[in-house]
Image (cartoon, grey):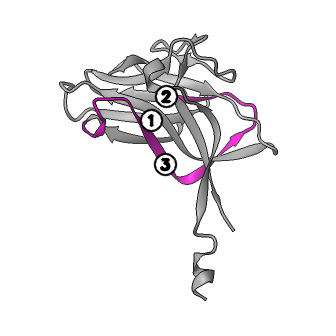
Amino acid sequence: AAQDSWQGMLAVDVVLESYVVPFADLDEFEVKSGQSWGQTFRYDSAGATYEVDKFSVVLSRESDADPGQTITLSLRSSWNGAPLASGTISSDALLTNEAWVTGTLPTPLILNDNQTYYIRIDSNGDGKVYAAADGSGNYARGDLINKDGNAENGKDMASRIVDRVATV
């Protein structure tokens, strides 16, 4: 009976899409009010749609960054479109060295296969907060999106798209 209560409660994270490189290979791109950065991605699952439960990016801040900046992570179907999912973190919670920051969605987001989606990072503050990207990236299914909303071919933000799958 005790074993039955565990069934369905265990889950494993399945990384659907990612661009992961050593932190030493990453450049910093400043995120501040009016200067957002992002990354596009596409995924082709076995079906017509797939679920996303989490997404991650690499962020950091300077030790003298203005305190209390609100950093917003969002998933979107277009750069300026409404967020499909979003969450916030205070700049105070960021480390002064690069580290993965993960947004966990309260309910899975259903996305369409082979459609381009955007991870976007915004801030309401004065900066000294950084998103990390590879200036010579080779992620084939997306690009770094600059502060003007344009793709920077050959550059890629460190990112992960994750589906949390229950185990039997």
Give the x, y percent position of residue 107.
56, 55
Asked which secondary structure carries label 1, the reply is strand
Asked which secondary structure carries label 2, the reply is strand
Magenta-drawn stretch contains 76: no
Q: For the residues carrying marks 3 and 2, which lies nearer the camera in this image?
A: 3
65 lies left or right of 57:
left
* Residue indicated by mark 3: 104
Q: CA distance from mark 2 to mark 1?
A: 6 Å
Up-down: is 132 above or below 108?
A: above
Chain part drawn in magenta: 92-120
Neighbours of disc 2 within 10 Å: few (<14), some (14-19), many (20+): many
Q: Amino acid at mark 3?
A: Thr
Q: Amino acid at mark 1?
A: Leu
* Residue indicated by mark 2: 120
Give the x, y percent position of residue 26.
46, 19
Give the x, y percent position of residue 14.
64, 48
Sooner in the amino-acid sequence: mark 3 or mark 1: 1
Magenta stretch prevailing secondary structure:
strand
* Residue indicated by mark 1: 73
3 lies left or right of 34:
right
Sooner in the amino-acid sequence: mark 3 or mark 2: 3
